Structures are given as C-alpha cells and as structure tokens.
Amino acid sequence: MFEFFESLQSCSIDEPSLSDSSQNTQPEMLSDVAASDDCRDASILEWFRGFFEPEELLRKNDFTNNGEFDLRYNCIVEGDVQTDLQYVDLQTHGSCSLMAQEQFVERYLGKDVAESELEEFAKSLGVYTPDNGTNFAGQDVILDAFGIPHQRYLDANIETLDKAVASNQDAILNVDAREFYQDSTMPPGTGHAVAVVGRGVDPATGATSGFYFTDSNFPKTARFVSIDQLNTCWTHQMITVPATSSPVTA
C-alpha cells in the first residue's frame, strides 16, 4: 500500500545546531553549502495514499543462485539485495528520509529501531515533523546519532554512485517521485528518499545496467531501476554508507 512521500517544495524549518559531538561522529562534508528544506504537502499525500503500487517490485524469491542473479532483469547482482530486504520497514508519516537511514542502522547494529523512536529524536532536534517531513539537516542525522560512517554528496552522478556500490557501499538518494515511479498522475515536485543496496551487471558485457533500490513505501521488497530511468528522476544528492554490518557487536 502506498504511504507517504516528502515534497521537494521548501518549508520553514530551521536547521539546528548539532554541536554535540555525540550527534556528529563523522566530519560533515559540504556542510557549508546551503540547500532548501525537503518537506511534503499533506493535502497531496492524503489524495495519493493507497493509490499506487508498482508492478516491478522484487521479493526475496525473485533472486537465484544465493541472491547473485536476477532472472527477471537478466542481471548479475552485486550487493546483498536479498538480505537487505529484511531491513526495509514501512513508513507511516512523512518519514521516508528517516526510514531510509533506519534500514542501515538496523543492519549495522543488528537490532530493530522503531520509526516512532526516530521521529521523536528528529523532532527534538527540529529537523523533522510528521506533516512537513525531514529538512536538509535531518537527512543524515540518524546516521550521525547511531555512529554509522557515511559521506554526503550534493552533486553526485551515475559514475560516482557506480564506483561507490562497486567498492562495497550502499547509498541514500533523493529522487523525484513522479519520475521514479513513472506515474504521470503524480503531482510534479513530489520528492522521496530511497536507498540503493546493489547494482545489476550485464553478464554479457560486464557493464552496470541499473541499481537495486529499497523503498519504505514498499517494505521487504526491492526495485530494479535502469541507468536511463535513474537519470530522469535523481536530484543528484547522495549519502553513502558501508554495505556491511558493524564489525563491533552492538
């Protein structure tokens, strides 16, 4: 069932001061670059809720050879997509950015983290409201809080993403939902945060043909997105994280 998207329209949420070192364990890349808030329009979301589910969703049993091949798209799968599906939980508010971070926190720590816990924490910092979603400062605040190593980019491209995934990293991307879902009935300017957990490689050429996304609107599933399609929907903001569990037992 379709839940909530965060809108790319700007809203008046002030970025907080994150001077507490316990909330900022990694050097903040590009922190001096201004960006508009990422928020959602409640009326649009109410209108759209329950309307759409893409037919191309992939589930665990769609992958063969221990998760290393995708028969539907004839791809060699690089990345543990089959395992990562278990960490994708459903968002129930405008929390897609928080929930994209949550799946990596759960994988890294090996334990469940509730959406409500993340919402309360982000609200306490002034970077999130259920009605307005997550602002720019909040897009990696959960990773910071749980000590997940990460790197933030404001103008990444396909080559940057491909190199990251090839070097055993996953990513969180900001996309235009209208283009991401290829649904012209969606209002223009509807934004969404999704995660990349692998790439598909053409077995004949060895070239990357697309990437595997997870989405908190569709828990426990993945979706293959071609490079051409990604180029139409990606805003080129990206946060990378290690594609592994924590080496330290939580």
Image: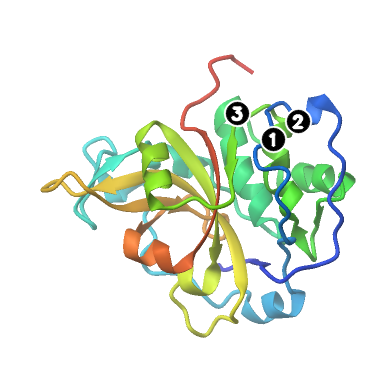
Q: Position of residue 207 (x, y in %)?
A: 21, 47
Name the residue: 33% across, 65% down: 228
Q: Nearer the viewer, residue 92 or 122?
A: 122
Q: CA distance from mark 2 to mark 3?
A: 10 Å
Alpha-carbon neighbours of circle 1 within 10 Å: few (<14), some, or many (≥20)? few
Q: CA distance from mark 1 to mark 3?
A: 11 Å
Q: Amino acid at mark 1?
A: Glu
- Give the structural element (helix, strand or loop) at label 3: loop
Q: Which residue in the structure is indicated by mark 1?
A: 28
The quarter of the rendered structure image containing the C terminus is top right
Q: Is residue 72 left or right of residue 236?
A: left
Label drawn at residue 24: 2
Q: Mark 2 or mark 1: which is in front?
A: 1
The quarter of the rendered structure image containing the N terminus is bottom right
* Coloration mode: rainbow
Q: Is residue 110 visible?
A: no
Q: Amino acid at mark 2?
A: Asn
Alpha-carbon neighbours of circle 3 within 10 Å: few (<14), some, or many (≥20)? some
Q: Is residue 66 left or right of residue 102?
A: left
Q: Position of residue 150 (x, y in %)?
A: 59, 33
Mark 3 or mark 1, which is nearer the start of the sequence? 1
Q: Where 127 sits versus 44, above or below?
A: above
Name the residue: 60% across, 28% down: 149
Q: Position of residue 238 (x, y in %)?
A: 55, 48
Q: Mark 1 or mark 3: which is in front?
A: 1
Name the residue: 74% across, 80% down: 43
Q: Nearer the viewer, residue 94 or 167?
A: 167
Q: Is residue 44 left or right of residue 17?
A: left
Q: Is label 2 in contact with label 1 (beta carbons under 8 Å)? A: yes
Q: Residue furthest left?
A: 204
Q: Which residue in the structure is indicated by mark 3?
A: 149
